Amino acid sequence: MSWIEETPPEKATGLLKRELDAAQRRAGRVWNIVQVMSANPEVLTASMAQYRAIMYGPSPLSRFQRELLATVVAAEVGCFY
């Protein structure tokens, strides 16, 4: 649980609702890292665009390599996301 005031998905409207609905479709749930950004839907939108560019955009790294790199970095810094 964060100290940041969050908007629950069932109370979201407009841009935030679209972003949380997309997160639900993408992952089958709204992960905490996405939910905590509900305080600022524009930041959530930008963050998701950056994620898509990094993970799915043109790159010399394969999709597998990108996921592996993200997993290793998360583990190294103690992130459980």
Image: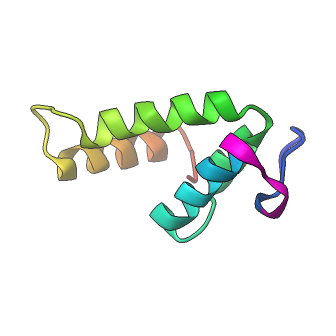
Residue occupying the far left of the picture: 60
Q: Is residue 38 above or below residue 31?
A: above
In the image, is 10 to the left or to the right of 52?
A: right
In the image, is 63 to the left or to the right of 11?
A: left
Q: Residue at x 41, y 37 (%)?
A: 51
Q: How is the image coloured?
A: rainbow
Q: Position of residue 9 (x, y in %)?
A: 76, 59
Residue occupying the far front of the picture: 14
Q: Position of residue 39 (x, y in %)?
A: 80, 36
Total tally of numbered discs in the picture: 0
Q: Is residue 26 above or below residue 64?
A: below
Q: Is residue 11 magenta?
A: yes
Q: Residue at x 30, y 49 (%)?
A: 67
Residue closer to the observer: 61 or 14: 14
Q: Position of residue 41 (x, y in %)?
A: 69, 35
| Residues in magenta, as a range | 10-15
In the image, is 55 to the left or to the right of 5?
A: left
Q: Residue at x 55, y 57 (%)?
A: 23
Q: Is residue 44 above or below residue 8?
A: above
Q: Is residue 52 magenta?
A: no
Q: Residue at x 75, y 42 (%)?
A: 38
Q: Quadrant of residue 60?
A: top left
Q: Position of residue 54 (x, y in %)?
A: 32, 34
In the image, is 54 to the left or to the right of 77?
A: left
Give the prevailing secondary structure in the magenta stretch. helix
Residue closer to the observer: 78 or 60: 60
Q: Quadrant of residue 36?
A: top right
